Image: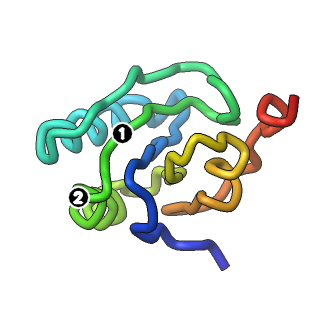
Amino acid sequence: MIQRPENLYARYHAHVYFGPSTVEQARVLCEKAGALFGIAVGRVHEREVGPHPRWSCQLAFDRAAFGRVIPWLEEHRDGLDVFVHGLTGDDLADHTTHASWLGEPAALKLEMFRR
């Protein structure tokens, strides 16, 4: 069972995952989320970045926006997978125990947090 996002932390990242055939879909989704909710939209990375095993775009938001952003992403992601995690200052925990998914989970590259 995929753990569903819960509003447990002060700040969050949602990483929208995509590939070559869905890059424009992801770009539009992220831009709309930024415009609708006034949240920070990161770069649309057309390469793997950090622990992410696929291309991604980061959305950053706080606890107050969580209840609007997450249901909207669930409704509008149209097959894109979204990795959601809290921000506590513990990168390994944030990307494991403080993490959840909209869609299918992917194995993250966590070695960088274990150094």
| Residue 52: x %, y % from top left | 65, 35
- Which residue is at 15% across, 39% downward? 38
> Split into 4 quadrants, where in the image is the N terminus?
bottom right
User: Circle 2 sits in a helix, a strand or a loop, which is it?
Assistant: helix
Query: Where, by quadrant of the figure, is residue 99 drawn?
Result: bottom right
Tell me: 47 left or right of 28: right
Give the label on residue 64, or none: 2
Query: Where, by quadrant of the figure, is residue 59 drawn?
Result: top left
- Which residue is at 45% across, 36% downward? 22
Tell me: 112 left or right of 57: right
The correct choice, above or below, for 14 with respect to 26 in the image is below
Query: Where, by quadrant of the figure, is residue 47 drawn?
Result: top right
Q: Amino acid at mark 1?
A: Ala
The correct choice, above or below, for 3 with respect to 84 in the image is below
Tell me: 92 left or right of 2: right
- Report crowding for label 2: few under 14, some 14 to 19, many 20 or more residues within 10 A (C-alpha): few
Tell me: 74 left or right of 85: left
Q: Are marks 1 and 2 in contact (CB under 8 Å)?
A: no
Give the label on residue 47, or none: none
| Residue 95: x %, y % from top left | 65, 48
- Report crowding for label 1: few under 14, some 14 to 19, many 20 or more residues within 10 A (C-alpha): many
| Residue 29: x %, y % from top left | 29, 42
Residue under label 1, please give it: 60
Q: Amino acid at mark 2?
A: Ala
